[in-house]
Image: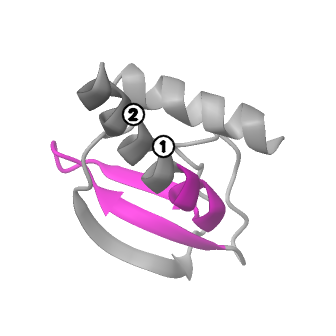
Amino acid sequence: MAPDALKELIRDRIKCGYLPREHTIELWQGGASFGHVCDACGAAIASNDPMGLLCGDNWSLIRFHLDCFKVWAFERNREADVEQTA
């Protein structure tokens, strides 16, 4: 996925509440994914690719490709900054 499209998708998922705006409990970064789907981009995380894993407010698991995790971390802070200046 193109970087700009990924940023826009993650921004939309934050706005609609599918991805958390706040950093919740980080369970790990770099562990094996076992073929799970990335909650940020919707693509499968290959079993040999490292992933990031968060625990959501409702104790749900949120899985990320590590690159998607980095984009989410940046965009959630960016969205908060935009709201504070509005």
Instruction: Describe residue 9's horizontal placement relative to residue 73 as left or right.
Output: right
How far is the residue under mark 1 from the one under mark 2? 6 Å
Residue furthest front as drawn: 85
Which amino acid type is marked by label 2? Answer: Glu
CB within 8 Å, label 1 to label 2: yes
- In the depicted structure, whether residue 73 falls above or below residue 18: below
Which quadrant is home to the C terminus?
A: top left
Asked which secondary structure carries label 1, the reply is helix
Residue furthest right as drawn: 2
Residue 43, image x and y in percent? 70, 45
Q: Nearer the viewer, residue 27 or 84?
A: 84
Instruction: Find out whether residue 37 is within the magenta segment.
Output: no
Work out whether residue 1 can be spotted.
no
Instruction: Determine which residue is flagged by label 1.
Output: 75
Residue density around tag 1, few if under 14, some if 14–19, many if 20 or more, within 10 Å: some
Residue 79, image x and y in percent? 39, 34
Instruction: Determine which residue is flagged by label 2.
Output: 79
Residue 31, image x and y in percent? 51, 81
Residue at x 39%, y 37% (from the top left corner)? 19
Q: How many marks?
A: 2
**Which picture quadrant has residue 55?**
bottom left
Bounds of the magenta segment: 50-71
Instruction: Find out whether residue 55 is within the magenta segment.
Output: yes
Residue at x 69%, y 51% (from the top left corner)? 44
- In the depicted structure, whether residue 12 falls above or below residue 43: above
Which amino acid type is marked by label 1? Answer: Glu
Q: Nearer the viewer, residue 29 or 22?
A: 22
- In the depicted structure, whether residue 12 falls above or below residue 22: above
- In the depicted structure, whether residue 82 falls above or below residue 49: above
Work out whether residue 41 can be spotted.
yes
Residue 70, image x and y in percent? 54, 61
